[in-house]
Image (cartoon, rainbow, N blue to C red):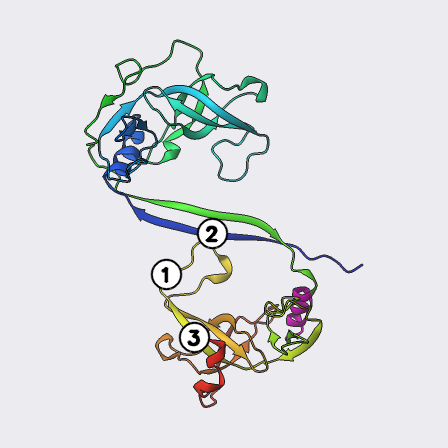
Amino acid sequence: MPEVRTAPLVVEFPFTRSLGPVQSAFLTGLRERSVLGVRGSDGRVVVPPAEYDPVTAEEIRELVQVGASGTVTTWAWNPAPRRGQPLATPFAWVLVRLDGADTALLHALDAPGPDAVHTGMRVRVRWAAERTGAITDIACFEPERSEPERSTGNGHQPAPHSGEFADAVTGITAPARLDYTYSPGRAQSRYIDALADRRTIGERCPSCRKVYVPPRGACPTCGVATDAQVEVGPRGTVTTFCIVNIKARHTANLDIEVPYVYAHIALDGADLALHARIGGIPYDQVRMGLRVEPVWTDDGRFPDHYRPTGEPDADYDSYKELI
């Protein structure tokens, strides 16, 4: 039986966004150990606060302060925390309706085990030691072992709040990350093996005769298996491209000075363009129709980049169907 290839892959995109007045007040409030909600048109207090009324869709701004204690409305036990989750030890994901709120806030509950968690239990916020104006300023919730805390100073009633703080938080960077294990399957395993020999192979559909690179194992148009291997390239044509002006972070194999160019390249003999970096030419001289060839490093298992061949540019009609 052939070896099954696997590799860990990470897709990460830190998204930077600005905050409106409601979200700014909410996150700044967390930094100051206060939880703010917003009152909707039906009188309900929404926590976390929404910028638009869930009933009428109108903009809402009436901020109120709610308690730092509340009641668990539902929960699920997490026996194996993953990277980046609030706690490193097993914990419960809980929805907590804070005192004075009418909706529930999702966060982690630090509990010794699932037997210690139940719907209706009283919990309170455990504040992070260092707070920056983010949801992580709530380190987690913990069981409340004493008389319920009323940080509003008004029993269960939410207290009006101006939403004004010194040095308000106006923007956040939200990290989005997906870790998974990839198995390429037979078609792409053959493709990877060929790259190790500095060859590029695709697979031809027996029905429409298109050659797919990288191969997919089946034709997406005809829905039939593509078992016939075809060697393509190594040269190809730039069909379209983009200029990258943002430097990749935390990526050891992409430490490239910006700006640089990533392009779709139709290899000779292929009916599908693959993407790769263009080098050996100033970024502002890359163009559609540019003829390119692969450049390999001494120990590389795939081309490091593509560079111009010096040939005349390809005619637009020869690659227009591959854009």
Q: Which residue is mark 1?
A: 246
Please indicate whether residue 150 sits to the left or right of residue 106 in the image. Answer: left
Q: Residues within 10 Å of mark 2 (few under 14, many from 20)?
A: few
* Majority secondary structure of magenta residues: helix
Q: Which residue is mark 3?
A: 240
Q: Are marks 2 and 1 in contact (CB under 8 Å)?
A: no
Q: Nearer the viewer, mark 1 or mark 3?
A: 3
- Residue occupying the point 41% across, 80% down: 288
Residue 204 in the image: state x and y as whole percent: 65, 76
The kind of residue on which mark 2 rests is Glu
Which is more toward the observer, 27 or 197?
27
Q: Nearer the viewer, mark 2 or mark 1?
A: 2
The kind of residue on which mark 1 rests is Ile
Residue 264 in the image: state x and y as whole percent: 48, 73
Picture quadrant of residue 300: bottom right
Picture quadrant of residue 287: bottom left
Distance from the alpha carbon under mark 3 to that under mark 2 = 24 Å
Bounds of the magenta span?
187-198
Assign a secondary structure to mark 3: strand
Q: Residues within 10 Å of mark 1 (few under 14, many from 20)?
A: few
Residue 145 position (above or below residue 38): above
User: Does label 3 or label 2 sit earlier along the sequence?
Assistant: 2
Residue 1 in the image: state x and y as whole percent: 80, 59
Q: Which mark is residue 141?
A: none
The kind of residue on which mark 3 rests is Thr
- Residue occupying the point 49% across, 36% down: 85
Q: Are marks 3 and 2 in contact (CB under 8 Å)?
A: no
User: Does label 1 or label 3 sit earlier along the sequence?
Assistant: 3
Residue 167 position (above or below residue 95): below
Q: Which residue is mark 2?
A: 12
